[in-house]
Amino acid sequence: MSTPAVLKKMDEIVDAFCKRNRFQTEPLTPGRARSFVRQHRQNTRRRNSVLKLKVATNIPDWDMKLKVIKACSQEIIADNEFGHGKAHWQILTEMGLAIGMTREDIENAKPIPTTEIAWAAWEGLMANKHWLEGVVANACAERANVPGYGTGMAREVGMAGAQRPQWKKLFNLTDDQVEFWEMHSAADLEHSDIAWKAVAAHAERLNMEDDVVHALDVNLRVWEMYFNGICDAGDQPGA
């Protein structure tokens, strides 16, 4: 498979993911929004402080390694480029407070079963795979936030951009209060480009064209389970 064909297939897999995962394709509800804040705050911290750093350890290219570490630092320490000096999980916490959640509810949340299963799956898919497969695992869901995938508004502005007006309307929020989604539209383009450029540069040379395509598909199926689990938890009474 040629490099253009690999990248085309990867884009098709992301597009299919965007068209089928329930968090992206079904209407936002208050329960699902609260469930997202509880789970994604934890997930952001774990993926960027543990899982993605294991991938960075295995990357032989120094510049690419530093780009992955920089992306992780924006998520969990401070993002001076897109987040006004705040970590992404902190901005997500602020959005949770803006929709009426308590800090105790957000900070004391526990991972639901599908989140725990996703973490276990990603441990194998990110820490114990070839570095190029790990780089794809790092960025596959971030790619879904880039315009050009899915349907309707998401295809025009990306998943994050399409979430922004839904949260504003449902909770009567200001632009500043949905900064989490605004920030990710730009940040995730930069972060996901690391993987797509790595595949373009190395997959054919390493004879890993089929491997990176499979890695993308499997990782996005894990993400689908993760997001659908958020929807199920948010649909429970009292969520």
Image (cartoon, rainbow, N blue to C red):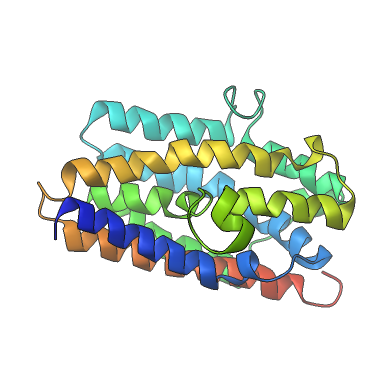
- Is residue 9 depicted above or below 103 in this figure? below
Residue 163 in the image, given as x and y percentages of width and height:
69, 54
Residue 169 in the image, given as x and y percentages of width and height:
84, 54
Question: Which quadrant would residue 12 be assigned to in this image?
Answer: bottom left
Quadrant where the N terminus sits is bottom left
Question: Which quadrant would residue 220 be assigned to in this image?
Answer: bottom left
Decide if residue 52 is in sight here.
yes
At x 67%, y 24%, the residue is: 84
Decide if residue 42 is in sight here.
no
Left or right of 225: which side holds 164?
right
Towards the viewer: 205 or 39:
205
Residue 88 in the image, given as x and y percentages of width and height:
63, 38
Quadrant where the C terminus sits is bottom right
Left or right of 87: which side holds 219?
left
Residue 131 in the image, given as x and y percentages of width and height:
25, 47
Question: Which quadrant would residue 182 be assigned to in this image?
Answer: top right
Left or right of 172: which side holds 72?
left
- Is residue 129 depicted above or below 194 in this figure? below
Left or right of 76: which side holds 39?
right
At x 87%, y 49%, the residue is: 102
At x 70%, y 37%, the residue is: 90
Tag count: 0
